[in-house]
Image (cartoon, grey):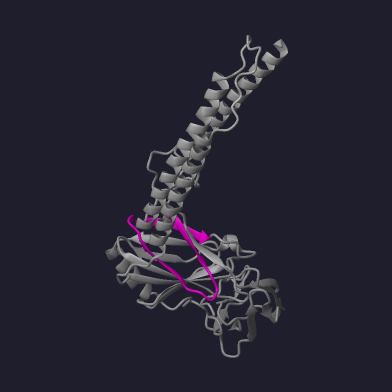
Amino acid sequence: MLTSVRRALGASRGFALTTLVALTALVAACGANISEPFPPQPGNEQPPGFFPTTPITEQGLLTENLYWITFVIAVIVFILVEGLLLWISFRYRRRHDDNELPKQTHGSNGLEILWTIVPAITVTALFIGALMTLNEQDTTNSQEAAVVVDVTGFQWQWTFDYPQYGLSFTGSGRDGPVMGLPTNEIVRIRLHSIGDPPVIHSFYVPQFLYKKDVVPGRVNEFDVVINQAGTFAGQCAEFCGLLHADMQFTVQAMSRLEFDAWVTKAQQQPTPNPDQPTPPAGAPAIEVTAVSVSEGFDPSELSVPADQPFTVNLTNADPAVPHDFGIRHGMPDGSDFMGDPNAPGGGSATYNIGPLPAGSYEFFCTIHPNMVGTLTVGQ
């Protein structure tokens, strides 16, 4: 009997210790990302942890409110369940003078009805709250949007088109393009996916507390009102292939006055790459075709004379996806030659390239760095 009592006491202590560890872990998790003064500056938050990042949009506030309602309910349930477990473990633990089994109760209709109805009501309320939040976020405003941005996702980059202003931005590499937006105004974002094969992407800005899939053959759109100026990072949040991690962009939120100035400056930008050297008459010209993201260039091996300027005429056979032409270490200072402008889907572009010393170089698409070939510069 003494051995049984010791085992019972040991089990109770073990349970209490496990519960204490779980509570400690919960408290630590709650404070995981609040080491900085609260609230943190938008755009400079720690990676998302136990609590959501600070929203910068009216729609993001809806998500935050839903999170806190869910969190409070979860904490109440946790405290109630764990509290009852602890109370039962200590209140009804076996004592040293217990020689008989206590009265055995098998089932309680009242309790069973209670712990069935209460969770059902709780889950139903949360479902309705989530549905209302999503409907409000996904429904475009009946008012006319102040700014409309057509966002096109393709492997592996973004294009931002502003039809009202005749502007278009396509980024390359991890820098990505910049989406300028006014604050405190309705902005409508329309999402498109292009490419062969068609691929699903996802438009995600953490501070929006919202993301939406970019689906081929379908235009998804949503309205957003940004209530705080700043610069915020965005990315594709749906795995879309080899260079998914490079599908990044930046949202630059500013006042209406600053946004108008940003638009004017962008409209006044000169033709891309105006400093391309003009090749002399008779300079060699090579023809190359960008077939597709998966098939690369045709031909994949090119050759030009050494120490002579030359021209590359790029034809883009990809019907929807832009491509360009770059050369690794193709500049006099050893940096990469970055082709500009892009050849739009089904279009073409010309690149005038300065003399290169003899050697073997890699040419590539700066938008899709997996598209590569060999450029041999002869003597």
Q: Is residue 49 left or right of residue 96?
A: left
In the rendered view of the protein, which quadrant contains the N terminus? top right
Counting labels gives: 0
In this view of the protein, which residue sits in the foreground, 275 or 71? 71
Q: Establish if 248 lies above or below 190.
A: above
Query: Was residue 264 drawn as part of the magenta stretch in this picture?
Result: no
Which residue shows up at 47% across the image and 40% down it?
74
Percent of width and height locating residue 80: 48, 32
Most prominent secondary structure in the magenta stretch?
Answer: strand
Q: Establish if 117 lies above or below 209.
A: above
In the rendered view of the protein, which quadrant contains the C terminus? bottom right
In this view of the protein, which residue sits in the foreground, 195 or 281? 195
Percent of width and height locating residue 6: 68, 14
Residue with the most extreme top position: 97
Which residue shows up at 50% across the image and 44% down it?
49
In this view of the protein, which residue sits in the foreground, 191 or 167? 191
In this view of the protein, which residue sits in the foreground, 367 or 235? 235
Q: Could you say which quadrant of the image residue 265 lies in?
A: bottom left
Percent of width and height locating residue 286: 64, 85
Residue with the most extreme left position: 257
Range of magenta residues: 209-236
Query: Was residue 215 drawn as part of the magenta stretch in this picture?
Result: yes
Q: Does residue 187 show up?
A: yes
Which residue shows up at 48% across the image and 38% down it?
114
Q: Does residue 207 show up?
A: no
